Image (spheres, rainbow, N blue to C red):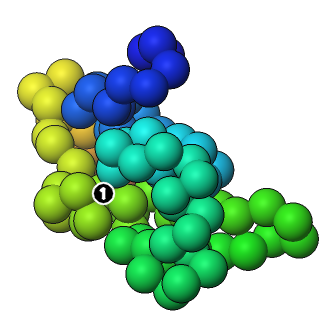
Amino acid sequence: MTPRGTWLSFGEAFDLPLAVDLRTAARALGLCPATAYKLIHQGDFPCMVLRLGWQYRIPTASLLRALGIEERPVYPADLRAGADFAERRNRATEFETEDYA
């Protein structure tokens, strides 16, 4: 985590969970928490806001869209892992469908 009062890096933004608390969303948007609360009460917060009891949660997808990030990046390691998985699955399927007659 970066020191208090600084914006989130791209790496930190892509590692966020499905929903974040209001302070984290405010930090990502470059707002102080008090301003974020005011915007919510005015109905002008730039993201979808979920109120869960006494807490606010911001869906990460909505936050990333507000930051102008429409899609998550694709990394070569992720592509390789997906290709390896598909290859293992195909080998298992071929084994199961062989005719032993």
Instruction: Between residue 6 and residue 9, name the one nearer to us.
Output: 6
User: Eyeballing the image, is 23 above or below 64?
Assistant: above
Vertical position of residue 78 compared to residue 16: above or below: above
Q: Residue 22: horizontal and vertical position, in percent?
A: 60, 53
Residue placed at 60% from the left, 64% from the top?
A: 37
Q: Is residue 43 left or right of residue 51?
A: left
Q: Position of residue 101 (x, y in %)?
A: 40, 55
Res 69 → quadrant? bottom left
Q: Looking at the image, which residue is at 48% across and 45% down? A: 32
x 36%, y 25%: residue:
6
Q: Amino acid at mark 1?
A: Leu
Front residue of 36/55: it is 36
Please tell me whether mark 1 sits on a helix, a strand or a loop. helix
The answer to whether 92 is drawn above or below residue 41 in the figure is above
Q: Is residue 98 visible?
A: no
Residue at x-position 36% and y-position 73%: 46
Q: How many marks?
A: 1
Q: Residue furthest bottom?
A: 43
Q: Position of residue 72 (x, y in %)?
A: 22, 49
Q: Is residue 37 toward the left or the right of residue 51 in the image?
A: left
Residue 52 or 93: which is nearer the viewer?
Answer: 52
Q: Which residue is mark 1?
A: 64
Pick the residue in front: 52 or 15: 52
Question: Is 2 left or right of 91, judged from the image as shown?
Answer: right
